Image (cartoon, helix red, strand yellow):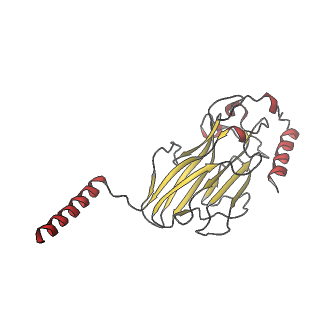
Amino acid sequence: MTMAVRTSCWLAALAVLGVSTPVAQAQFVPGNFNYLFANTSGTPITTPQTISAVGGFLSFRVYLVQTGGSPSMDTVGLAGLGVRLTYPGGIVRIPSTSPINMTENKGDQVNNVGFDFVTRSGVTSGDTNTATTAALTENAVGNPIVFPSDLGDSMRVLIGTFRVQATTNGTATITLTDPFAGNDNILGNGTPVDSFITQGQTMQVQVGSVPEPGTLALGGMAVAGLAAIRRRRR
């Protein structure tokens, strides 16, 4: 099912359920929404994250946050939601990326359970190290609306919890963008908000230990000492 067809189906479902879709009444500008990285307790992530060794895992949440405009998601909720994660292949991976997996929670991409129609996708199938992107979209077709207060939040709705696995030492940057062309993020009154989302939020993941500044200083002193000894011998 294409994104355009799915969007039409969601809006039609809202109409059948008696939910109006006054798109023209929405008052938004670009930047009224953004994506947010958070830890599994919901606290925003503002510093680089670490996976201590190859094979280790890091779990985190991604939210859609409203920063302005009206109507608010607190009052009208969300009927559709989605995000795409892009990351460097060969350093980290999301093990369960696959072309299409609907209505199931895969351990490495767990959706907000308030949404009852879920699609996940990646550029490659199976558990490969070469995938560089994974998307998650979800819709409240039968629910029909999901509110921030459902999980005790305000002005933000959980998209899902993701888990990345380290495949080699290095630094990976994970970037958040809109998942597909078309309307994936839709308020409960039928208003699409994809064009008002600030995209490109990033989170750095360091795989392997990072030397402490003191360790680096000691290493530099040792190198300098060896150089002095060599000079004396000459």
Tell me where residue 231 appears, x and y as whole percent: 15, 67
Residue in the foreground of this view, choosing between 222 and 146: 222
Rendered residue at 61%/56% (across/down):
86
Residue 229 in the image: x percent, y percent? 14, 67
- Residue 78 against residue 174 in the figure, above or below: above
Question: Which residue reaches farthest front?
Answer: 234
Taking 225 as reference, is 111 above or below it? above
Q: Residue furthest left?
A: 232
Q: Quick one: quadrant of the C terminus? A: bottom left
Image coordinates for residue 79, horizontal then vertical, percent: 75, 42
Q: Is residue 20 left or right of residue 180?
A: right
Residue located 57% across and 49% down the image: 61
**Residue at left 64%, top 60%?**
106
In percent of width and height, residue 118 lies at 72, 54
User: Quarter holding the N terminus?
Assistant: bottom right
| Residue lying furthest bottom | 233
* Left or right: 214, with 4 as reference point: left
Q: Is residue 192 left or right of residue 12?
A: left
